[in-house]
Image: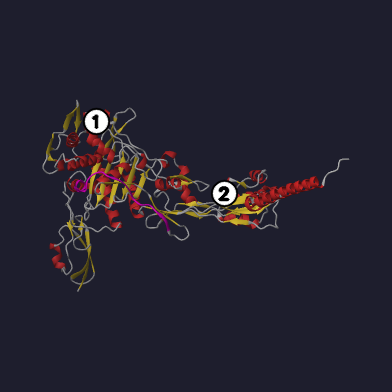
Amino acid sequence: MKRVSNVTMRKRIVTVFLFAFLLFFVITIRLGYVQFIMGDELMDKAEASWSRDIAFEAERGQILDKNGLVLAENVTAPTVMIVPRQIEQPERVAGLLSNILEISEEDMLVELTKNTSIVRFNEGRKVTEEQADAVQTLALDGVYVAKDTKRYYPNGDYLSHVLGFSGIDNQGLMGLELYYDEELSGEKGSLSFYSDAKGQRLPSLADTYQAPTDGLDMKLSIDAKVQTIIERELDQAEATYNPDGALAIAVDPNTGGILGMASRPNFDPEDYQSVDADIYNRNLPIWSTYEPGSTFKIITLAAALEEKVVDLYEDEFFDDGSMEVGGATLHCWKVGGHGQQTYLEVVQNSCNPGFISLGQKIGKEKLFSYIDDFGFGEKTGVDLFGEENGILFNLDQVGPVELATTSFGQGVSVTPIQQVMAVSAAVNGGYLYEPYVASEWLDPVSGESVETVEPSLKRQVISNDTSAQIREALESVVAKGTGRGAYVEGYRVGGKTGTAQKVGEDGQYMKDNHIVSFIGFAPANDPEIVVYLAIDNPKNTVQFGGVVAAPIVGNIMEDSLRAMGVPTTTEGLGKEYQWPDQPLVEVPDLIGVSRNELQEYLINLSIEASGEGDKVIEQAPAAGTKVEQGETVRLYFSD
């Protein structure tokens, strides 16, 4: 028998000890890693394997106008959910729930016996408070009522294409609700309870509640007062002209913030399923593209003045009603033409041949470079889905005829929002801004501002001097030219009419089917609002922008300026009246006038008298107010 030496024995003992120590060390490190590094993760997995979660939806952020008026909010709409494995008598429970939730017992039983942890079913979604109370009163095991909400639009179809709507899961589906869905949605919360392998609730373990994080409130650039006026005027236009469509958009020219936007036909965001998808999917001010007509002449005017190819007061043009260009005869809207005119009168009269001559003076390269600089042919970048680009001629395809027609707004395709932003740049000093609707984000609890949207300046297109000349010329259009219908007593309004031909399916221009429009701004010396309105194929009327669209924009301007607190003025150009229009009458100062003296003051006005005595001590309207002939002046007499 071989004997092992003490040295060898000690080596073996040390080797075993070292191996055991190493093994112990590895196990200790592993245990420490599992305990301290992976502990939370493993605990979460363990809890997840025997816990069940009932989701609690976050409160969707409110949408407010610029002054804090609520445009979209949430109302309580609880949701009933089922945990099938906790249902002990499914037939009995089905009978009880079917009566409350308006579902057949057979269908309810199918939901109660599904082989899944938690069941959410359509009839249990967004139930009324009365239904939720009735379910809770039953105190059925496995039947839970979770807090939930649904979107509510307090003003119905007001601003519908801009606000959009959300679905049954409170997810944004259209408009601002979709564009800013992530910011408005917030994060879901949950109520977790623990169950065994069979799904039975473990009463010894407490439930865990994770509160949802509500979405941010969104404040818009929209002014509800302006929006209300626009909605009213479009409703009246629909009732009067029965058009194929109508739209309006109002912008702050100094920031790009949209003050109002509306389309017709309209829809109710809470009942969008009842209308055709073409109605709610088409926000016309950003989606619709068409030949702009004469409103586009403002761009030609801006290019001509910036390039100094014309003096509006000194240079003249003779219009005989048509013009030969590249073998084609292009006509003025006025048969026989306007005769000899200054170029300021060319602008006032919206004379097509006169603008053709301006386009020829500018040249195609320069004119189309200004068209590009003013933002046509590309999206404006407004924070809404569905914006179109419009269509312009490729420069290498532009010949004499294309240059001529582009000069007066035919042959190109643009969107309303492109037009309103371009004209805003033309009259605000030359600065082209990116339009926006969302202006600020607010904490839903404190109401404090989280983020403010700053105006985004793209570029300066023309000089301040050129912009001032454009404002002056367009103010004269409203006072003396084709835009007289938009004139507002007490405010300086500038603008331009538009009557655009529509192209049919055969590629030819349609007869007696036009888009009539007007774009206006005020005050003309320092614009605070730009309004564009278009009526598609108005019926039973002369289809001219000056006849149909201009008066509507005048109404929008007058009421909006007053609502915005813009003071009236006696400065600016006076309106040049034409038959059958009658000039306004200024109300005289009648305070202190006796009854016998009244006749010499009120030749063109009616009187409504009250009070006893011989002298006028109060009057309405106040002295200096201009009213239509025949209007009533209310007087109060006393001794």
* Image position, residue 125 (x, y; %): 57, 49
Image position of 288 with respect to 78: above or below = above
Q: Is residue 22 left or right of residue 300?
A: right
For residue 394, above or below residue 165: above
Q: Compare residues 145 and 504 and report the one nearer the observer.
A: 145
State the residue position of label 2: 125
Three-letter amino acid code of the residue under disc 1: Glu
Q: Which residue is mark 1?
A: 402
* Circle 1 Cα neighbour tier, 10 Å, few/some/many (<14 / 14–19 / ≥20): some
Q: Position of residue 331 (x, y in %)?
A: 19, 32
**Residues shaded magenta:** 449-468
Query: Which mark is in front, 1 or 2?
Result: 1
Residue 597 visible in the current orientation: yes
**Location of the C terminus (image quadrant):** bottom left
Q: Nearer the viewer, residue 247 or 370?
A: 370
- Give the label on residue 562, or none: none
State which quadrant residue 395 falls in: top left
User: Judging from the image, what secondary structure is the residue with disc 2 in?
Assistant: loop
Foreground of the two, 605 or 562: 562
Residue 333, horizontal then vertical, whole percent = 20, 36
What whole-number distance in Å separates the C-alpha atoms at marks 1 and 2? 59 Å
Q: Nearer the viewer, residue 283 or 128?
A: 283
Asked where in the image residue 368 lies, by quadrant, the reply is top left
Label 1 element class: helix
| Residue at 70% in and 58% down | 204
* Residue 87 appearing in the image: no
